[in-house]
Amino acid sequence: MFPILHKNTRNQFIIFFVAQNLFSNINGSIVPTNETDMYSSNESVRSRYGLYETILYKNGAIEQAEYHWARLWLSLTQLGFIIPEDYTPSFFEAQIHELARLNRLKDVGRIRIQFFALEAQKPLMPFYFMEAISINKSLNEWNIRGLVLGILKDFKKPIIKESNCKINHSLHIPLAKKAMVENNWDDALLLNTEDRIIESSIANLFWIKNDVIYTTPLSEGCLEGTIRAWLLLQLRNNGYEIIEKKLSQHELFEADEVFLTNSIRQIKWVERIEQHYFGNQKSKELYQKIFKK
């Protein structure tokens, strides 16, 4: 058996142990998970130079697959990796489906693929491992209780192109986890080096004011989220007004509604940031109209 970190409803981190009959994919080879040290809760592995993708697997389908592969090729290139010729969507999708079958993913699951360099010298050749675990389907359903967020003020994310990538060794992750536990937050909002709010520790940020939907531009250093990119297209196709805009703390506090998006949780509305409260009427409409299909 091996440990995996999981968060309860108040974001306190608990450890549970995964049964020995799970399998992992180590660079294309299927192995029993309890026979390898390649798993995501192993910090020595998780912190290696490289990047990762977390993908929602739902009812036998890979959600937003084309957005994940587009981001993966771009991120590998930005981080200095050579992309092998066999790295194609069909190459990874076949392995995802096989691992999901072996691990008996039924309704909803999380696929995590981590890429890193075995040798710290260029040209960087990617090595990867893949996990597939079942998750509670409530994780990507509408949240009845709104999220409570705070602002992480002792870290500033740099405004560089690498900040758009889902990097393994991002310093904000452990700092955000610490602040969340200490303050009983559900997530922590991040600032960039210009003291503007850009995202949360695990999600992209959207806010609504006077029926206009806003999100921060990639040029501010936020993650190039797959659901962010997909939702921008869906919003425009459904006639919503959407604007990418830099965000000050004051403007955020003046918003009517705030919500977060990521590949696993989809859309989650925010009830409170510090002492400022928000509604959820428009956010719930988006969930019903765009996400709940």
Image (spheres, helix red, strand yellow):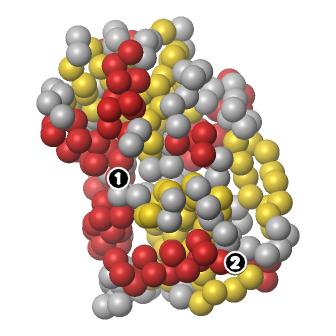
Residue 188 lies left or right of residue 195; in this view the side is right
- Quarter of the figure that contains the C terminus: top left
Relative depth, front residue between 259 and 248: 259
Other residues around mark 2 within 10 Å, as few (<14) / some (14–19) / many (≥20): many
* x 79%, y 64%: residue: 18
Relative depth, front residue between 269 and 176: 269
Label placed on residue 217: none
Disc 2 on helix, strand or loop? strand
Name which quarter of the figure residue 214 lies in. top left
* x 68%, y 24%: residue: 183
Relative depth, front residue between 242 and 224: 242
| Amino acid type for the residue under numbered disc 2 | Phe
Relative depth, front residue between 163 and 60: 60
* x 23%, y 41%: residue: 234
Name which quarter of the figure residue 107 lies in. bottom right
Label 2 sits on residue: 23
Residue 240 seen by the camera: yes
Q: Residue 27, position in %: x, y? A: 54, 86
Label 1 sits on residue: 226
Q: Residue 261, position in %: x, y? A: 42, 39
| Amino acid type for the residue under numbered disc 1 | Thr
- Quarter of the figure that contains the N terminus: bottom right
Q: Residue 86, position in %: x, y? A: 35, 90
Residue 145 lies left or right of residue 22; in this view the side is left
Residue 69 lies left or right of residue 8; in this view the side is left
Above or below, 133 against 129 in this view is above
* x 51%, y 75%: residue: 97
Above or below, 47 against 121 in this view is above
